Amino acid sequence: MGEIEIGVIGGSGLYDMEGLTVREERTVETPFGAPSDVFVIGELEGRSVAFLARHGRGHRLMPSEINFRANVYAMKVLGVERIISVSAVGSMKEQYAPTHIVVPDQFFDRTRHRPDTFFGEGLVAHVSLADPVCAEMVELAVEAAREAGATVHRGGTYLCMEGPQFSTRGESLIYRSWGVDVIGMTNLQEARMAREAEICYATLAMVTDYDCWHEEEEDAHTASILEVLRQNVKTGQRVVANLVRRLPERDAEHPCANALAGGIITDPARIPVETREKLHPIVGRYLSS
């Protein structure tokens, strides 16, 4: 078990919660550049937790500007074995109303401009994304949300769009016809990077609106979304605390802890020294001489 057990990625208001004792703010440097912000490290429910503001404090980064590789790499360096993601989403189904929580178990990629792997530069590896989130964490997240009094839905597909604009009505109707459950702009790359880094990952998708497909509801716009976001913050805080308390220490045989096993394709003798060193926190145990 690492120095810090659990990472939480969400809004900066998320770590202003009752029961959290902040120990320090820590800057983590990575070979992929700077993470979104400093890490707020503290104790919550008797566990060591690192919080990261996904868009930076003050919400300075667009979804396409978030350095997902640096964020997850830094979590790995800190010793994090599980990441809880909290994010705002639009609902693509009538039954998922604003203030509800969806805990998705699938993703669909509609992004275009984002690095989405740690690998390359002479090192090729493939991991399975058939089931892109940690099944154990999904079940525990649903329990945690119910304990917090939230209306929660287990499973579903999160469509990750590029943004920063919201959908056109045509896009929204097509996405809805595909059967996706929620739409957001951030979580797919986190899930990809977490899997490559062998970190368990799950999303608390906090519904703020009905995108623009719903004929009887107001189209998604910033003012209305921010109002629901404010309501969701307190709920999200309670759910995160409940989930942190429930998460067991991760067993060495956990599937997420071994996602890269057998996945490195490149002949170790041909991997450039610079790449080997750069990715040591992620691949080191498979390439030890």
Image: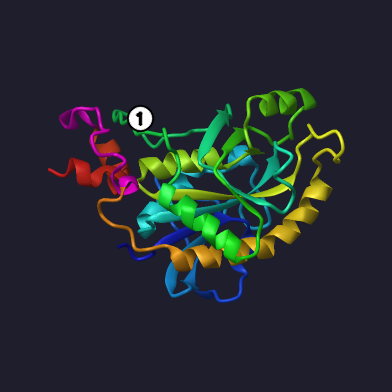
Of residue 31 and residue 51, the one placed in the foreground of this image is 51
- Which residue is painted at 74% across and 59% down in the image? 230
Which x, y percent locates residue 100? 68, 52
Residue 260 vs 112, above or below: the answer is below
Q: Quadrant of residue 48?
A: bottom left
Q: Position of residue 80 (x, y in %)?
A: 39, 57
Q: Residue at x 42, y 62 (%)?
A: 247
Label 1 is placed on what type of residue?
Gly
Residue 264 on the magenta span: yes
User: Is 258 left, or right, of 239 in this rendering?
Assistant: left
Left or right: 232 as drawn, with respect to 193: right
Question: In the figure, is residue 186 to the left or right of 227?
Answer: left
**Residue shown at 47% from the left, 63% from the top:** 50
**Residue 287 in the image, given as x and y percentages of width and height:** 19, 41
The answer to whether residue 34 is above or below residue 261 is below
- Front residue of 153/168: it is 153
Tell me the quadrant of the picture where the N terminus can be found.
bottom left
In the image shown, does 230 or 26 lie closer to the viewer?
230
Q: Residues within 10 Å of mark 1 (few under 14, many from 20)?
A: few
Q: Say if the magenta span includes residue 258.
A: yes
Label 1: element kind = loop
Say whether residue 236 is visible: yes
Which region of the structure is painted magenta? 255-271
From what the image shows, is residue 151 above or below residue 127?
Answer: below
Q: Residue furthest left?
A: 289
Left or right of residue 53: residue 289: left
Is residue 184 shown above or below 10?
Answer: above
Does residue 38 show up? no
Percent x, y of residue 276: 26, 39
Here the colouring is rainbow
Q: What residue would you read off at disc 1?
A: 120
Q: Quadrant of the C terminus?
A: top left
